Image: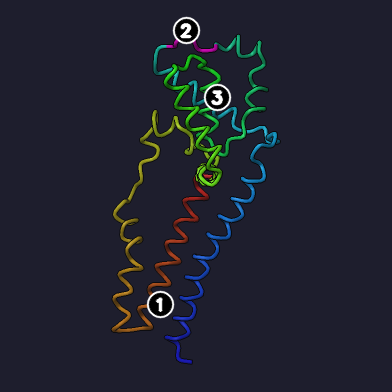
Amino acid sequence: MEWPWVVLAIFIGLAAFFIIYPAYKKHKLQGKVAYWFGRIPEARAGLPQAAASWDSKTSTEETDPAFVDDLTWNDLDMDELFYRLNACQSAVGDVWLYAALRDPSASEAVLHSREEAWRAFEYQPRLRLEAQCLLAQLGRRPEASLDIPVYHSQIMALRNKAFYRFMAFLPFICLLLLPFSLGWGVFISIVAMLGNFGLFMGMKAKNQ
């Protein structure tokens, strides 16, 4: 077998891996989310980050008298209530739940919209599972919280945007080389794919 065909076989193998592995991870995540739905959450997670997000919010605007203050919160042992209710899959959910407990003065329109959402998820379990998995993919990394993009958006600014755009289009550009040089076209495509995978893993490790 000539080396261009060996390179092509490697390219096909890598492409299959990048297709099959994400599908396997998604299937595994769906199973985990479906298993824990309706069960009492075991993990005591999300409170410190959600509380910090609430502090960021209330420090930038006038405090509503209807908000539950720290003294009342502690007297009612609301931390334990938060942990008991918190079946959220992400920092976004943690922040929303904490804010809902801190601000019980929701209007009738807000309560109605929440009830509509709950009913939609109740009668469409597939939709609920998909929404849960999307949120679970965000996780509880610091940048997945709401206060970062809202109050500190400069932290999330992506540097060297032109480089990342180039790397994103490089595999497709390399395909243009295939009619002229199968070996070089496939080889450069593999290098581009591995480079993009390395960038992805590097940024993921940095943000965890």
Magenta region, mostly helix, strand or loop? loop
Extreme residue in the bottom direction: 1
Q: What percent of the width, then of the height, locates residue 166?
A: 31, 60
Residue 67 colored in magenta in the image: yes
Which circle's residue, 3 or 1, is located before the other in the chain?
A: 3
Q: Which mark is residue 157?
A: none
Q: Which residues are magenta?
A: 63-68
Asked if the residue under mark 2 is in contact with the one under mark 3, i.e. CB atoms within 8 Å, the reply is: no
The residue singled out by tag 3 in the image is: 98
Please name the residue shown 68% across and 36% down the image. Answer: 43
Residue found 34% across the figure and 56% down from its top: 164
The x, y position of residue 56, in whole percent, is: 46, 23
Direction from residue 112 to residue 158 in the image, left or right: left
Q: Name the residue furthest front.
A: 123
Left or right of 201 on screen, residue 192: left
The kind of residue on which mark 1 rests is Phe
Label 3, label 1: how far apart the Cα atoms are = 51 Å
Nearer to the camera, 100 or 112: 112
- Residue 65's disc is 2
Dot 2 amino acid type:
Pro
Q: Residue at x 39, y 78 (%)?
A: 186
Disc 1 marks which residue? 187
Q: Residue at left 48%, top 14%?
A: 105
Q: N-terminal of the two: label 3 or label 2?
A: 2
Q: Secondary structure at mark 3?
A: helix
Mark 3 neighbour density, 10 Å: few (under 14) some (14–19) many (20 or more): many
Quarter containing the C terminus: top right
Q: Amino acid at mark 3?
A: Tyr
Q: Earlier in the sequence, mark 2 or mark 1?
A: 2
31 magenta-colored: no
